[in-house]
Image (cartoon, rainbow, N blue to C red):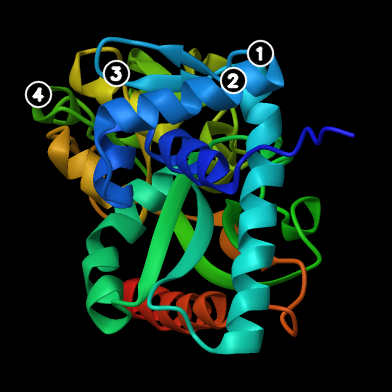
């Protein structure tokens, strides 16, 4: 009976192309030509009888079938790698899959990962981002960095970082706000995915939330850019938002007014005992790194 199991090399090429969203970047990682990557992906699609990628001018994105197939491919490749390591010793490169909420990846992880790579050059880290709870389901990862209730995402974990909130705006707008009530003169940009937001700030400042006018965005990076473009006042979520607020040219509206957030960032995994060596190394590093960021 003919098998439907695809070539292992096709699967490796598919995984690299899906992770990098580029045939050329996948080719560089696999020491192949971009044409060879394209040919092998096409061969896999032909065997499966369905497209796995949408082709664009300078990138590729997964189709629905590709997104559904990727976690199983990644997990299968990782199981094979783990079994090989257990029987025959450490491989030259250890692959590690990490998924992080977008703001933490942008504002915290990006600055620290060069140090991680210097300390652990043998670990080949694949980082993806998400924004809402559904982004963190149906995807294979070793570790996830999430915000909010950790029980929604995994069975074990560690708290990494808490946040504090304060209003920010372009300097000309911030100069017009001398007392908390002045916030109501402007549109307030609300991030709909956060539980602790403007109403939480108003409660702490004893302000009537009913006077506010809102514009809704789905993440703090977009909120900062909207504020910088004149769209209203954003809510900083320090320290994770420090970088995007600085890049956007935003400043605090009320000096010294900050409110502790209600939730925290957590590192999530299914079982501490089952963590692979590369995941254990990342966990130790991110715990130390987050503690240092929290004390700055």
211 lies above or below 79: above
Q: In which quadrant is the N terminus drawn?
A: top right
- Which residue in the protein does label 2 denote? 45
271 lies above or below 77: below
Cβ atoms at labels 2 and 1 below 8 Å apart = yes
Q: Depth-wise, is mark 4 or mark 2 nearer the camera?
A: 2
In the rendered image, residue 173, in percent from the top left (x then y), is placed at 17, 23
Q: Disc 4 or 2, which lies upstream in sequence?
A: 2
Q: Find residue 50 and name its label.
A: 1
Q: Depth-wise, is mark 4 or mark 3 nearer the camera?
A: 3
Quarter location, residue 275:
bottom right
Real-space CA distance between mark 4 and mark 2, rounded to the nearest whole angstrom: 55 Å
Q: Depth-wise, is mark 3 or mark 1 nearer the camera?
A: 1
Q: Residues within 10 Å of mark 2 (few under 14, many from 20)?
A: some
User: Residue 212 or 84: which is nearer the viewer?
Assistant: 84
Real-space CA distance between mark 4 and mark 3, rounded to the nearest whole angstrom: 15 Å
- Which residue in the protein does label 4 denote? 172
Which residue is found at the position 36% from the left and 54% from the top?
238
Q: Residues within 10 Å of mark 3 (few under 14, many from 20)?
A: some
Helix, strand or loop at label 3? It is helix
Real-space CA distance between mark 1 and mark 4, rounded to the nearest whole angstrom: 54 Å
Quarter location, residue 134:
top right
Q: Find residue 226 and name its label.
A: 3
In the image, is 115 to the left or to the right of 194? left
Which residue is found at the position 40% from the left and 34% from the top?
220
Q: Depth-wise, is mark 1 or mark 4 nearer the camera?
A: 1
Helix, strand or loop at label 2? It is helix
């Amino acid at each position: 009976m003919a098998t439907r199991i695809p070539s292992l090399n096709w699967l490796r090429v598919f995984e690299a192309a899906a992770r990098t969203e580029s045939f050329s970047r996948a080719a560089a990682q696999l020491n192949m030509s971009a044409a060879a990557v394209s040919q092998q992906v096409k061969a896999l699609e032909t065997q499966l009888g369905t497209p796995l990628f949408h082709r664009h001018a300078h990138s590729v994105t997964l189709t629905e079938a590709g997104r559904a197939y990727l976690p199983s491919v990644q997990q299968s490749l990782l199981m094979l790698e783990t079994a090989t390591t257990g029987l025959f010793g450490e491989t030259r490169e250890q692959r590690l899959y990490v998924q992080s909420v977008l703001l933490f990846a942008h504002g915290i992880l990006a600055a620290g990962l060069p140090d991680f790579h210097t300390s652990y050059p043998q670990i080949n880290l694949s980082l993806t981002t998400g924004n809402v709870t559904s982004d963190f389901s149906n995807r294979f990862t070793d570790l996830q960095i999430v915000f909010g209730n950790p029980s929604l995402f995994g069975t074990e974990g560690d708290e990494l970082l808490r946040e504090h909130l304060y209003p920010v705006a372009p300097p000309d707008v911030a100069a017009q706000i001398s007392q908390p009530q002045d916030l109501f003169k402007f549109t307030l940009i609300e991030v709909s995915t956060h539980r602790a937001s403007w109403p939480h700030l108003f409660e702490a400042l004893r302000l009537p939330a009913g006077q506010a006018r809102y514009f809704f965005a789905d993440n703090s990076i977009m909120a900062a850019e909207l504020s910088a473009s004149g769209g209203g006042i954003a809510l900083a979520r320090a320290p994770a938002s420090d970088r995007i607020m600085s890049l956007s040219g935003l400043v605090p509206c009320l000096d010294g007014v900050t409110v502790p957030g209600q939730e925290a960032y957590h590192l999530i995994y299914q079982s501490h005992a089952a963590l692979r060596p590369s995941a254990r190394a990342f966990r130790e590093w991110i715990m130390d790194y987050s503690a240092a960021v929290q004390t700055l």
